[in-house]
Image (cartoon, helix red, strand yellow):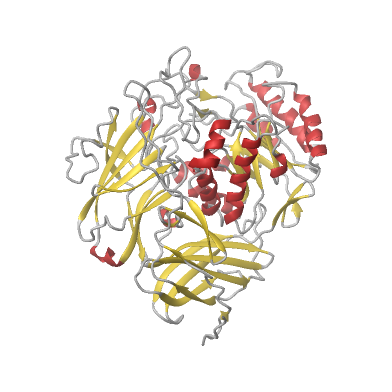
Amino acid sequence: MTESLPLSRRTVVTALGAAGFVALPAWPEKARAADGPASAADGPVLDTHPATEPSGTHVREVGGTRVVFQYGAVLPAFDGWRTREPTREYLSLDRKWRFRFDPGRHGLGEGWQSPDLDDRTWDLIDVPSAWDLLDTPGFGSETTPFGKGTAFADGYAWYRTVVDVPGSWRARHVRIAFLAAGYSAEVWLDGVHLGKHEGANSPFALPVAGALRPGTRQTIAVRVFRRASYTDYTAPAPQPVTDDHEVPYKPVDYWPYAGLTRSVWIEAVPRVTIAKLLVAGANGRLEARAVIENHGASDFDGRLTLDPGRDSGARPTVVEARIAARSAGVVRVSVPVPRAPRWSPASPHTLTARATLTAGKPSGPRVDTLSTVYGVRELTAGDARLRLNDKPLFLKGLNWHEETAARGRAMTPAEYDRELGHITALGGNFIRNCVYNRHPYVYDWADEHGVLVMDDIDTMWLNTAQEKLQTERYGLARAQALTMAWNQHNHPSVILWGLQNESEIDAGGAPVYRAWLADLKAAVKAVDLTARPVTWASSTSNDPAFDLADVIGFNEYFGYFYGEDSDLGPTLDAVHAKYPGKPILITENGTWSLAGNHGPDTTEGTEEWQAARFTAHWAQVVDRSEFVAGFTYWVLKDYKQRAGYNQAYNGISVMGLLTFGEERPKLVYEAFRKAAGPGAG
């Protein structure tokens, strides 16, 4: 139904609105069993798991839009770490918390979640931070002995803090937001269990209804778990510790930082609130979906005004917004933005869209607001090319790990600026967020600096049994794919969804592997209005599921782990012959060197050898740019890992353009900077 609204100088369109609603709280239909038995007392400490991943992440169609739900509510926007909406109240929990390790697993039984616990003798820890850096001298040094300090403290640890809850929050919907907790976290408010989350690098928000007591002081307790990588980190042949339910399930080639590693805050929003604003700008139009929750007891009848932002060439647009009581609905808006500049690496123009919800008429009282940054651009994959705004893309890219020697994964904005600044200094236009989601700052930075992004989830080195478990029952890998696409949806810099890294391929046509990838692909495609291409970092150029990929991605280490450098070109030709319409992306290639080790470029481990190997591979890729979309070097900086090798260097992998602690360039840094793309003189 179209309703004519008495407005001047505003565009009035039909409220496509929610054709239906989803009642709140919304949990998946599959039952969630109680936690299983804990690990044996004499064995490694393992976390407990329900029958399906504990956050209840799932997608439902609401008014023609697929919406992601978690903990019975819409997975909200996580802009509260930096943005303050005028209709909301925020309480930052970035501060010192009480902290204690719980190696004996006594905390639950002794009531460490209770507000009555006397925790004055506990240690203090900064939030955000990684407990690895609490007491590990020389963490960033190649000469420090491996295996000592809190970097190797595994199992459970507890965090506690108190908050004075404003009395005004009685009429609010309140949630506690965590940008990350590694690996898993359970949260209590005054002893009331709010929920559990798995996955060290994805944000989550827990509604606190039923536990909140406005006008009082309340205690938040968080129990964080990290699985040990090995039973003995310094043994000659260390025994790995695995857990089939976790993602990743075994030791992997990066450091699994533990604790509350990113920001935490409480957000109090109106009972009728815009939980998420999905936007997609392309071909001169802005498509928007405002996902609205009504936590009140009465139906809501109002208006939603969408302002596409300055420089968009469009005026605010008003549509009806009718949401049933205790339900979630979607209001759809489509607005021409004829003068909006296109976003590209050369001209990274962004705009800010703002949705305003009002009661009754548009001139009625303001209920809630939510803004989001977006860009207008067209992205396609076809005819063996990636194209942005109808122009072929060639990606000069870098893998990178989110860490510094000083703070681990709890990086500061200044550290991000320094780290990511190397990308542009090197002439790069692309980063792969290898094997996990990054802090929101990274995506904002990429939008502002015109750097393209392949976003990954934690699905590294799964074997066939885990792929089958994730697809058929546990669903954590699917949850990570859904939340990645939902959380990063509006960023114009994000051009590729990465589904997995070097996971096992079963025999006989790979039915398990293909079903798993198809499930992950369906998840991201379900919620992405822009239909970004999907890819993954395969361990082989003969992946039997490449027909499912929009962009063929594989890691190659010719001349290092196998074969000769010169084998790359013929391999690329063979892949192109088999899949002539699909662009190809080298998702990893690199070698290693010890900083300061110089010699002939034929001597492995010298800086000269590392630089020469890069140059040889780069040349073969550039020569095939008509069907190879780019090259992603492994890796920007040397990095820490607990994978059972490089212990002679304190667990530092020396494959970077830069050293880990000092961030000193090696010769390959300059070789990469000078590497010219196709068409260069």
Is 669 on the left-hand or right-hand side of 575?
left
Question: Where is residue 425, by image quadrant?
Answer: top right
Whether residue 61 appears in this view of the structure is yes
Which residue is found at the position 37% from the left and 39% from the top? 129
Which residue is found at the position 54% from the left and 84% from the top? 3
Estimate the x, y position of residue 640 in percent, counting from the top left: 49, 28
Whether residue 423 appears in this view of the structure is no
- For residue 362, above or below residue 170: below
In the rendered image, the residue lying farthest to the bottom is: 6
- For residue 291, above or below residue 206: below
Judge by depth and name the residue closer to the eye, 493 or 509. Answer: 509
- Location of the N terminus (image quadrant): bottom right
In the rendered image, the residue lying farthest to the top is: 236
Judge by depth and name the residue closer to the eye, 676 or 351. Answer: 351
Question: Where is residue 626, by image quadrant?
Answer: top right
- For residue 116, above or below residue 358: above
Which residue is found at the position 51% from the left and 30% from the top? 254
Is 419 on the left-hand or right-hand side of 50?
right
Judge by depth and name the residue closer to the eye, 154 or 640. Answer: 154
- For residue 409, above or below residue 242: below
- Location of the C terminus (image quadrant): top right
Estimate the x, y position of residue 550 in percent, counting from the top left: 70, 46
